[in-house]
Image (cartoon, helix red, strand yellow):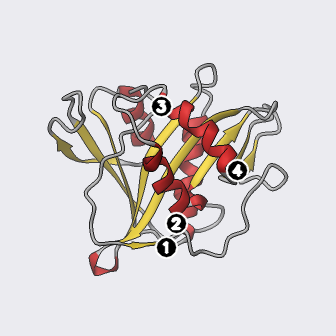
């Protein structure tokens, strides 16, 4: 996996699906979640099947284990609000983050970052960090209590990115990936938002 791609595995609790029932106005090119006037890069939520065709090759290119189309659809169709895409000023898809949020026993709302990818040539510009920030802010708006993810222990750049954003190493998962590599589970505990967002 590249420094901008995360693993997908997670234990599957009895969970109530959130996100697909929310009354949300999607953020489009004309109403983006965020735009950078200097670079022309803008970020918006998933809008439809055409976006899926941009997301799959972007993520699949760097995976250490392949995902079926059903894996992508599971996340994107159930939590479209938590799928964010980054576009260049020429409207090319250059990055994406795919997440979910579920209710666990005891009422805990847990967000999960399933996939994060940034296109070659656009890395180290802060796009991955911005995608994560936007996703976490959306989850926080929906009263999320914590956000988790897994990444390979050898993926130093991804570990540095997430730790810089406040994620902590929660657990080491032995031989977690099909290639036999261990993973770290990272966790971010959230507090109520004030002002303009979490980070």
> Residue 125 appears in which quarter of the rendering?
top right
The answer for how far apart the CA atoms under marks 3 and 2 are is 28 Å
Could you tell me if the residues under marks 3 and 2 are in contact, i.e. CB atoms within 8 Å?
no
Query: Relative to 181, is 165 above or below?
Result: below
Element under disc 3: helix
Mark 2 crowdedness (10 Å alpha carbons): few <14, some 14-19, many ≥20:
many
Element under disc 2: helix
The answer for how far apart the CA atoms under marks 1 and 4 are is 21 Å
In depth, the one of 189 and 144 nearer the eye is 144
| Residue denoted by label 1 | 143
Q: Earlier in the sequence, mark 3 or mark 4?
A: 4
> Is residue 83 visible from the viewing direction of this image?
yes
| Residue 134 point in image, percent of width and height | 60, 52
Q: Earlier in the sequence, mark 1 or mark 3?
A: 3
Could you tell me if the residues under marks 1 and 4 are in contact, i.e. CB atoms within 8 Å?
no
Query: Relative to 128, is 179 above or below?
Result: above
| Residue 75 point in image, percent of width and height | 48, 55
Could you tell me if the residues under marks 2 and 4 are in contact, i.e. CB atoms within 8 Å?
no
| Residue denoted by label 2 | 140
| Residue denoted by label 3 | 60
Q: Describe residue 3's horizontal placement relative to residue 198 as left or right.
A: left
Q: Residue at 25% of width from left, 57% of height from top?
A: 11
In depth, the one of 190 and 4 nearer the eye is 4
Q: Point out the frontmost of discs 3 and 2.
A: 3
Could you tell me if the residues under marks 2 and 1 are in contact, i.e. CB atoms within 8 Å?
yes
Q: Earlier in the sequence, mark 1 or mark 4?
A: 4
Could you tell me if the residues under marks 3 and 4 are in contact, i.e. CB atoms within 8 Å?
no
Element under disc 1: loop
Mark 3 crowdedness (10 Å alpha carbons): few <14, some 14-19, many ≥20:
some
The answer for how far apart the CA atoms under marks 1 and 3 are is 31 Å
Query: Relative to 160, is 191 above or below?
Result: below
What numbered label is drawn on residue 44?
4
């Amino acid at each position: 996996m590249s420094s901008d791609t995360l693993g997908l595995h997670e234990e599957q609790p009895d969970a109530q699906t959130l996100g697909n029932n929310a009354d949300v106005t999607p953020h489009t090119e004309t109403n983006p979640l965020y735009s950078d006037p200097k670079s022309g890069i803008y970020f918006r939520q998933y809008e439809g099947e055409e976006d899926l065709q941009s997301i799959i090759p972007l993520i699949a290119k760097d995976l250490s284990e392949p995902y079926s189309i059903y894996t992508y659809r599971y996340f994107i169709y159930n939590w479209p609000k938590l799928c964010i895409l980054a576009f260049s000023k020429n409207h090319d898809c250059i990055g994406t983050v795919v997440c979910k949020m579920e209710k666990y026993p005891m009422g805990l709302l847990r967000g999960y970052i399933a996939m994060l990818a940034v296109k070659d040539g656009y890395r180290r510009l802060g796009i991955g960090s911005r995608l994560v920030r936007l996703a976490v802010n959306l989850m926080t708006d929906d009263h999320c209590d914590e956000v988790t993810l897994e990444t390979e222990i050898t993926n130093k750049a991804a570990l540095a990115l997430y730790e810089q954003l406040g994620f902590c190493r929660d657990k080491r998962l032995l031989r977690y990936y099909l290639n036999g590599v261990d993973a770290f589970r990272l966790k971010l505990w959230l507090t109520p938002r004030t002002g303009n967002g979490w980070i």
